[in-house]
Amino acid sequence: MTIAGIRVSDYETAKAWYERLLGSEPSFIAHETEAVWEPAEYRSIFIVEEAGWVAARIQRRARLYLAATVPAEPVPESETPAATESVGGFVHSGGPIRL
């Protein structure tokens, strides 16, 4: 059996889009914000609304990226940019910049 699940932030819009993509209405509605298509025997595709998951994934990826790239120890004063130096298009007013 193969099952593919897709989390969506707007159930009604996603449902309409997948109906057009798959060429049919869902085989059944599991609950108010979950629709299931069965395009072939032992094959299922479902969408489920989970509005908060996008922000959680973005935050998690940002934390993982920062953990992998930001130095654990303080940056020496001699290695910090000048008070009004532009770094990556952003101007800061002083203090260490850790990218």
Image (cartoon, rainbow, N blue to C red):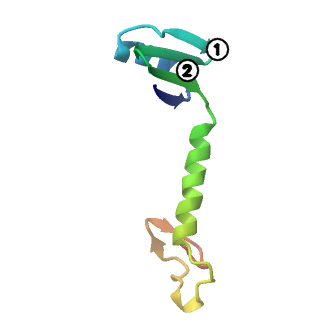
Name the kind of residue labelled 2 in the image.
Tyr
Taking depth in this image into account, of 84 and 71 the one nearest to the observer is 71
Instruction: Give the residue pinned by disc 1.
Output: 32
Judged from this view, the residue extending furthest toward the bottom is 78
Q: Determine the image quadrant of residue 52.
A: top right
Please give the name of the residue rendered at 52% of the width and 62% of the height, measured from the top-left corner.
Answer: 65
* Tally of numbered discs: 2
| Image-quadrant location for residue 62 | bottom right
Helix, strand or loop at label 1? It is: loop
Q: CA distance from mark 1 to mark 2?
A: 9 Å
Residue 39 location, x and y as percent?
Answer: 39, 15
Question: Would you say 22 lies left or right of 53 here?
Answer: left
Q: Residue 17 vs residue 53: left or right?
A: left
Q: Residues within 10 Å of mark 2 (few under 14, many from 20)?
A: some
Residue closest to the eye, 79 or 5: 5
Residue at left offset 64%, top offset 14%: 32
The residue wearing badge 2 is: 11
Examine the rendering and report whether any part of residue 41 can be seen: yes
Residue at image position (58%, 19%) is 34
Rendered view: 46 above or below 95? above
* Residue type highlighted by circle 1: Glu
Mark drawn on residue 88: none
State yes or no: discs 1 and 2 in contact (Cβ < 8 Å): yes
Quarter holding residue 30: top right
Residue 77 vertical position relative to residue 23 in the rendered view, above or below: below
SS at circle 2 = helix
